[in-house]
Image: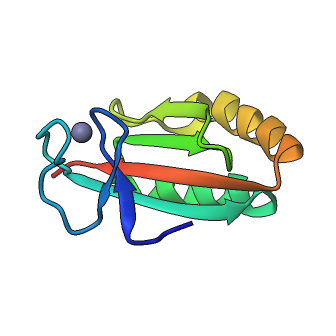
Amino acid sequence: MNSDKMICKNCNKDIDDSAKYCPECGSSTGSRDEFYVDSDHLVEEIKKIIDEGIATRIIIKDENDRTLLDIPLAAGLVGALIAPWLAALGAIAALVVKCKIIVEKPN
Ligand SMILES: [Zn+2]
């Protein structure tokens, strides 16, 4: 794990955290937070992010960088609409020890 790297939204290459544009494909790096969380705290972390109401998309990956869940939040996902996602998160949390959470926010 290297906290000085992030992943390009467009081509998924590792790029430097301070880069404004991806050196591989030239796309804007925008605003994208990445962090690891123990699966025990996965559901509560995601709830917190959704409650903040800023994120436009949340991607959950495993330690091998495989995407487990890709949650689009563009339409202001609330209440009952979130429930199926939280159920899916619960299932993921039972399978993995650590997850990577990627939170996309508008520029
Ligand atoms: Zn790129």
> Can the viewer see residue 50?
no
Q: In the image, 51: left or right of 94?
A: left
Ligand 1 shows up in the quarter that is top left
Q: In the image, 107: left or right of 67?
A: left
Residue at 14 percent across and 39 percent down: it is 27
Residue at the front extreme, as displayed: 24
Total numbered badges shown on the rendered structure = 0
Residue 95 horizontal/vertical position (percent): 86, 41
> Can the viewer see residue 103?
yes
Q: Which residue is more in the foreground, 64 or 72?
A: 64
Q: Which residue is more in the foreground, 104 or 49?
A: 104
Residue at 41 percent across and 36 percent down: it is 73
Q: Which residue is more in the foreground, 83 or 2?
A: 2
Residue 37 horizontal/vertical position (percent): 66, 63
Residue 13 horizontal/vertical position (percent): 35, 42
Residue 26 horizontal/vertical position (percent): 11, 40
